Amino acid sequence: MRPDPSRTLQGVGINLMTNVMAEVKSPFGQQTVGLAATLSFWLAEEAERGADRLVTENRVTRDILRAGLPLAGGARAAGEAAIATPAAANFTISSLQAENDSLRRGLIDLHAAVESNPSPDAQSMNERIWAELVESTRRRQFQARI
């Protein structure tokens, strides 16, 4: 047997909402069960998409860092260090997240550098970084609405 985390967590959430909720009498208990069900649905969704989201973000962030390196000014060393972050050795969420955290630190430094640079190339890079930050936020939105 191979348990599927996403389907299992969805099943837990459905069971909480359809079976357990009816047995809970207090408003506080019902709110707690509802919250636990919602968290189960969100965890199910993240279990399914998490690795793909991080692989995508890591690739895009590396691309932005490489393109922005000439504009990094005093943040160049931080950008180079971030680019030198080894790719995750596997596709576990923890490995991919560690890579993402390192790349994001470099992106923050690059972003600060280009925001203070009035050149057209720097402003274009600033817009590219903002576009990725918006897209990154969109990738994290949950589809499950309870």
Image (tube, rainbow, N blue to C red):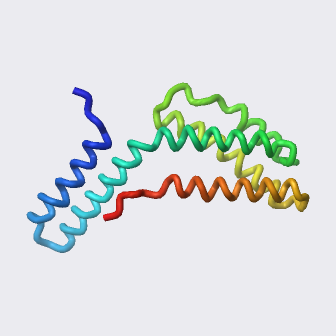
In this rendering, position of residue 61 left or right of residue 109: left
Q: In the rendering, at what x and y percent does residue 19 appear?
A: 12, 58
The furthest residue to the right = 119
Residue at 31% x, 53% y: name it: 41
Q: Position of residue 57 (x, y in %)?
A: 59, 44
Q: Please determine whether, in this image, residue 118 is positioned above or below residue 45.
A: below
Q: Position of residue 91 (x, y in %)?
A: 49, 31
Q: Quadrant of the image for the N terminus?
A: top left
Give the camera-side residue of 36 and 2: 2
| Residue 80 higher or lower than 10, as above or below | above
Position of the C terminus, as image quadrant, is bottom left
Q: Pinpoint residue 144: horizontal percent, then vertical percent.
A: 35, 58
Q: Is residue 43 left or right of residue 15?
A: right
Question: Residue 102 or 144: which is nearer the viewer?
Answer: 144
Single out the residue that lies furthest toward the left.
23
Q: Residue at x 53, y 36 (%)?
A: 96
- Tell me which corner region of the image, top left, top right, bottom left or bottom right, holds residue 88: top right
Which residue is at 82% across, 54% downward?
113
Instruction: State left or right for residue 72 relative to residue 17.
Output: right
